[in-house]
């Protein structure tokens, strides 16, 4: 396990300390659980998006430029 330091606003520190006491956990346990939660939410989502590709285009009949002369409208 790696030991690290973080800086917290006073209010957040007090809230974390109260939460840890109410759950009978250490503050380190609160931060580990929080980090695990964030990783499960954001890294799982990024992993899922890497394999995603847009669906193939469907033939809806006709074409986008049928009957339109965009060059003439620009002149």
Image (tube, helix red, strand yellow):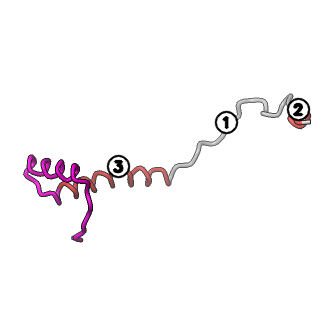
Q: In the image, which is nearer the foreground, mark 1 or mark 3?
A: 3
Magenta-drawn stretch contains 18: yes
Q: CA distance from mark 2 to mark 1?
A: 28 Å
Marks 2 and 3 close (CB-CB < 8 Å): no
- Dot 2 or dot 1: first in sequence order is 1
Residue situated in front as seen by the camera: 38 or 8: 8
Please tell me which residue is depicted at 78% across the width and 30% down the height of the picture. 62
Q: Which mark identifies residue 50? A: none
Q: Seen in the image, is 61 located left or right of residue 11? A: right
Residue position marked by numbered label 3 in the rendering: 41
Residue position marked by numbered label 1 in the rendering: 58
**Where in the figure is residue 70, as x and y percent of width and height?**
86, 35
Q: CA distance from mark 1 to mark 3?
A: 33 Å
User: Does 50 sit above or below residue 71?
Assistant: below
User: Does 60 sit above or below residue 1?
Assistant: above
Q: In the image, which is nearer the foreground, mark 2 or mark 3?
A: 2
Q: Seen in the image, is 43 located left or right of residue 17? A: right
Magenta-drawn stretch contains 67: no
Residue position marked by numbered label 2 in the rendering: 73
- Please, what secondary structure does the residue beneath circle 1 have? loop
**Where in the figure is residue 50, as x and y percent of width and height?**
50, 54
**Where in the figure is residue 49, as x and y percent of width and height?**
48, 50
Q: Which residues are magenta?
A: 1-29
- Please, what secondary structure does the residue beneath circle 2 have? helix
Q: Quadrant of residue 25?
A: bottom left
How packed is label 3: few (under 14 Cα within 10 Å), some, or many (20 or more)?
few
Residue situated in front as seen by the camera: 38 or 15: 15
């Amino acid at each position: 396990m790696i030991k690290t330091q973080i800086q917290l606003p006073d209010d957040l520190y007090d809230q974390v300390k109260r939460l840890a006491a109410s759950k009978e956990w250490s503050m380190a346990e609160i931060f580990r659980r929080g980090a695990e939660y964030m990783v499960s939410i954001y890294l799982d989502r990024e992993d899922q998006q890497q394999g995603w590709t847009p669906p193939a285009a469907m033939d809806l009949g006709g074409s986008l430029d049928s009957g339109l002369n965009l060059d003439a409208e620009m002149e």
